[in-house]
Amino acid sequence: MKRVLCLSLVFTILCALLSFTPAAAATYGDLTYENCGDHIEITGCSENAVSVTIPDKIDGLPVTSIGDRAFEDCSDLKTINISNNVKSIGHYAFYGCFNLTDLVIPNNVTNIGNAAFMDCNNLLNIKLSNSITSIGNFVFSHCESLSSIIIPNGVTTIGNSPFQYCYNLENINIPASVIDGAEEVKSNSGRLNINVDKNNPNYSDIDGVLFSKDKTQLLCYAKDKAQPYYTIPNNTVSIGVGAFWDCSDLAKVKIPNSVTNIGNRAFVGCKIKNIDIPDSVTNIGEYAFWQCYYLKKIDLPSGITKISEATFALCYDLRAVGIPKSITTIDPNAFLLLTGLDVYYAGTKEEWAKLNCDLPYATIHYNSTMPKDPDISILNCTNNSVTVDVSNLNGTSGTVVLAVYDDYNETLKFMISKPAAEMVTFDNVDLKSSIIKVMLWNNMSGIKPQAETDETLVF
């Protein structure tokens, strides 16, 4: 009997579920909305809408919120007027509105959700509400046309990478109210100037580079296309987490003797070929030089005791590493996927064995220091200018020679020379459609150059 009753109950529930038809979403022009009892939330929009106005009221109730993903992939939408009654904009609310160009967010809006304007590729101008107190995660990520933005005074926190891949963003202000997350403003434009209000209690800037208030911590450098070589100011003590992250055009950084710490992921993805780390540095963080594909050699300072996880992983061009006796620990993945490596270890073979470091494709040179041979590399190259870095010149007189060859038949077009210095620039030379090579010659011996670059094609 109980089994029959149970079966009958199940059958009744199934029939009820099958016969239930959800109510159609309420519409207002191109908009769909939900009546929440005391207010209206916009929940969707026609994908073909070109211009939309969110009204003050619908059904006599104030429209106070734009829901999660309400305008997602409305790729034809060009303009939207938002009512002054709106107080919140949901997560991914305008995600993928490719043709939206201008937007004013009313001052009553206090909350903007994560990734609210992600992938609004043509968004040129946006005026933020003066009432918001935070910039959420990835809010303007991939807004590739955005060139400047004013963060209102009143914002206290900035979330994860809100301006990631904003390739045209060149100026951003950090108001006095921001106390956390300013280092997250990097935009991938390579030309970003960060300007901090002088009354900000936690942050400051030096020439568009973000620092801590006392200027001892370098927090964010994002000018690598405009300035592919950078000298860190004296008195800087720490290079922060991800400070130069993805500065893919950054070719040279000069670190002063005041620096003691290089943070995790500090130089990930940089174009650096050589970098001198002073002996004042006692810590190099995890993944510090990960994916620095052009890094050729590095001499580690005598003050560090550990080579951390993936510090030099995927640095495929790395050929020489100097390791001091002070090292007591080498993470198994510190040199992940590297081959053809020459390791110059200051200690004995027995001391190396105690480190339990397995580098099957490396040649270990015991009781050795890394050779300090002169080296030369191209830092920056355009159609009419070449900037060259000369390292380990060690006071030796020399000449830097730029040789320019025809791209079509590789015949020599002309050569220019300048006295060797730490940095040499050749300006006002026609390099278009040419192959160039730069050489360092010792003035005392002309048999062959002391150092030379690979051939580089200039389009």
Image (cartoon, rainbow, N blue to C red):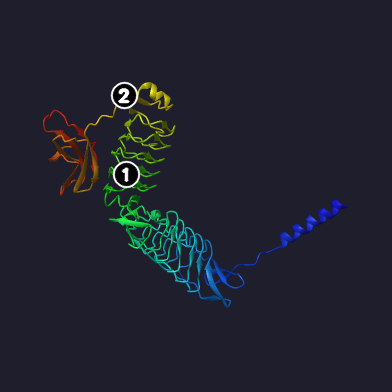
x, y percentage for residue 204? 33, 57
Residue at image location 39% in from the left, 21% down from the top: 350
Amino acid type, mark 2: Asn
Q: In this view, does 452 lie to the left or right of 121?
A: left
Q: Is residue 23 left or right of residue 198?
A: right
x, y percentage for residue 69? 52, 61
* Up/down of 263 relative to 4, above or below: above
Q: Residues within 10 Å of mark 1 (few under 14, many from 20)?
A: many
* Up/down of 210 relative to 371, above or below: below
Q: Residue furthest left?
A: 444
Residue at image location 22% in from the left, 48% down from the top: 382
From the image, tell me which residue sits under label 1. 259
Identify the mark nearer the N-term, 2 or 1: 1
Q: Along the line of sight, which residue is nearer the eye, 188 or 80?
A: 188
Amino acid type, mark 1: Val
Q: Residue furthest top?
A: 350
In which image quadrant can residue 447 be found? top left
Q: Is residue 408 visible to the viewer in this orientation of the structure?
A: no
From the image, tell me which residue sits under label 2. 367
Q: Along the line of sight, which residue is nearer the eye, 353 or 141?
A: 353
- Label 1: state its secondary structure: loop
